[in-house]
Amino acid sequence: FCLMSELKSIKRPNEALIKLIEAIGILLNVPKRYKSYYKVPSPSNYDNTIIQLTNDYSKCIYELSNLKSSSIDSRTAYELYEKMMEPGFDYESAIINGGLYCRELFDMVIYLISELQQDIERHPIELTNVYVLFNGSRSSYVALDTAVHIFNHGLCTATVLSLEDKTSESLLGTEITDLSHYLCFDIERRFKSLYKLPSYKCKINELSLTNESAYCNIINNVIENNSTIFVLGID
């Protein structure tokens, strides 16, 4: 109880400790609140989870130890995995900031994640990275929309194809301006405002279409991002 009181007294928990306590709160179905007594992003279940852990730590541990994959619903499993994928979810940093109790809590979270991943009778929880090529055409917008909706957990990488010399001449003799710079901003806007993706789940880069090594660069990008699905729209 003394150590949990010390945890409660940490007014500015580091990122790792916040993620750990929030993960415990997800497993215990602790409600979120918008106003926090601590320096944490809102809304968060951090305050309410700390209160539960402090008031009856043994009961919380008992409830967590009795959890199995079959007793965790899909929404809770999804939220838990999303929390684990967030930047800053780190074992050592959480323990340094929160104390020895965090070791037991962290081990329980990792164990339950493993249980969920290995349960063949439920919808698989896995990391899926998707790579999409984008040139501004209608089909590429459809491809982008498809990529975002199928990658679930992981990273969605959008590569904007551009012209090497930034301008070219059409069959009618008029000048065509490369819009890749605009397209990058448009994709960034869609990732943030339309799809509501956090920055760590999406990535945008630009690739010259006229470069002789363009195809090799595409393959290298797919490999570097550990992409398992390739999405391409064709008009």
Image: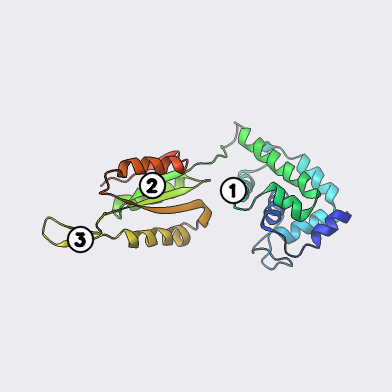
Tell me the residue at 69%/56% (across/down). 18
Frontmost of labels 3 and 1 is 3
The residue wearing badge 3 is: 176
- Tell me the distance, in whole angstroms, between the alpha carbons under discs 3 and 2: 24 Å
Tell me the residue at 39%/53% (across/down). 205
Q: Amino acid at mark 3?
A: Ile
- Tell me the distance, in whole angstroms, between the alpha carbons under discs 1 and 2: 21 Å
Looking at the image, is 120 positioned above or below residue 157? above
User: Does residue 29 appear in the picture of this structure?
Assistant: no
Frontmost of labels 3 and 2 is 3
**Could you say whether the residue bearing mark 1 is in a helix, strand or loop?**
helix
Q: Position of residue 154 (x, y in %)?
A: 52, 46
Which quarter of the figure has residue 204?
A: bottom left
Question: Is the residue marked by circle 3 packed among few (<14), some (14-19), or many (20+) residues within 10 Å?
Answer: few
Q: Nearer the viewer, residue 120 or 177?
A: 177
Q: How many marks?
A: 3
Name the disc covering residue 132, or none. 2
Q: Position of residue 44 (x, y in %)?
A: 67, 60
Q: Amino acid at mark 2?
A: Val
Looking at the image, is 114 positioned above or below residue 133? above
**Could you say whether the residue bearing mark 3 is in a helix, strand or loop?**
strand
Q: Amino acid at mark 1?
A: Met
What colouring style does the render use? rainbow
Q: Nearer the viewer, residue 44 or 170?
A: 170
Please tell me which of labels 3 and 2 falls first in the chain: 2
The residue wearing badge 1 is: 85
Instruction: Tell me whether the residue at label 3 lies in contact with that at label 2, contact meaning CB atoms closer than 8 angstroms.
Output: no
Q: Nearer the viewer, residue 191 or 56?
A: 191
Please tell me which of labels 1 and 2 falls first in the chain: 1
